[in-house]
């Protein structure tokens, strides 16, 4: 993976901390909207992590593919994965 590992690790640890906080909120039977806001904040971090990783994939794995066929395979793989997410 060619993404900035330190940045990815920091963001994922932040998301993990938020998830731990959300679990405590659920256990404490906190207000639903407050829990939902924290869930959305965690999703936003995970989306940014995914964007970083996919950007690195395009810049490295796709652009440095050895052949046009390999490049197309990597692009098709990415499109297929995005199709699953965007349903």
Image (spheres, rainbow, N blue to C red):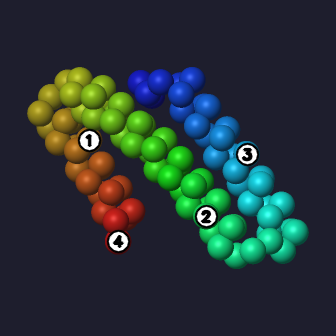
Q: Earlier in the sequence, mark 2 or mark 4?
A: 2
Q: Residue at x 23, y 50 (%)?
A: 76
Q: Quadrant of residue 19?
A: bottom right
Up-down: is 35 above or below 80? Answer: below
Count of numbered circles in the view: 4
Circle 3 SS class? helix
Question: Residue 38 or 80: which is nearer the viewer?
Answer: 38
Tag 3–tag 4 contact (CB < 8 Å)? no
Q: Which mark is residue 87?
A: 4
Which residue is labeled 1 in the image? 74
Task: For the C terminus, give its image quadrant.
Answer: bottom left
- Labelled pair 2, 4 in contact (Cβ < 8 Å): no
Q: Which residue is mark 3?
A: 17
Residue 5 percent location from the top left of the image: 53, 25
Which residue is pictured at 61% across the width and 31% down the height? 10
SS category of the residue bearing label 2: helix
The disc, 3 or 4, on the residue closer to the chain's N-terminal end is 3
Mark 3, residues whose alpha carbon is within 10 Å: few (<14), some, or many (≥20)? few
Q: Which residue is mark 2?
A: 37
């Amino acid at each position: 993976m060619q993404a900035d590992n330190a940045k990815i690790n920091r963001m994922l640890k932040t998301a993990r901390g938020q998830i731990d906080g959300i679990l405590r909120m659920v256990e404490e039977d906190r207000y639903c909207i407050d829990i939902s806001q924290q869930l959305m904040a965690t999703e936003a971090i995970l989306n940014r992590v995914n964007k970083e990783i996919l950007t690195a994939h395009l810049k490295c794995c796709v652009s440095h593919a050895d052949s046009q066929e390999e490049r197309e395979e990597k692009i098709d793989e990415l499109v297929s994965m995005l199709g699953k997410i965007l349903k």
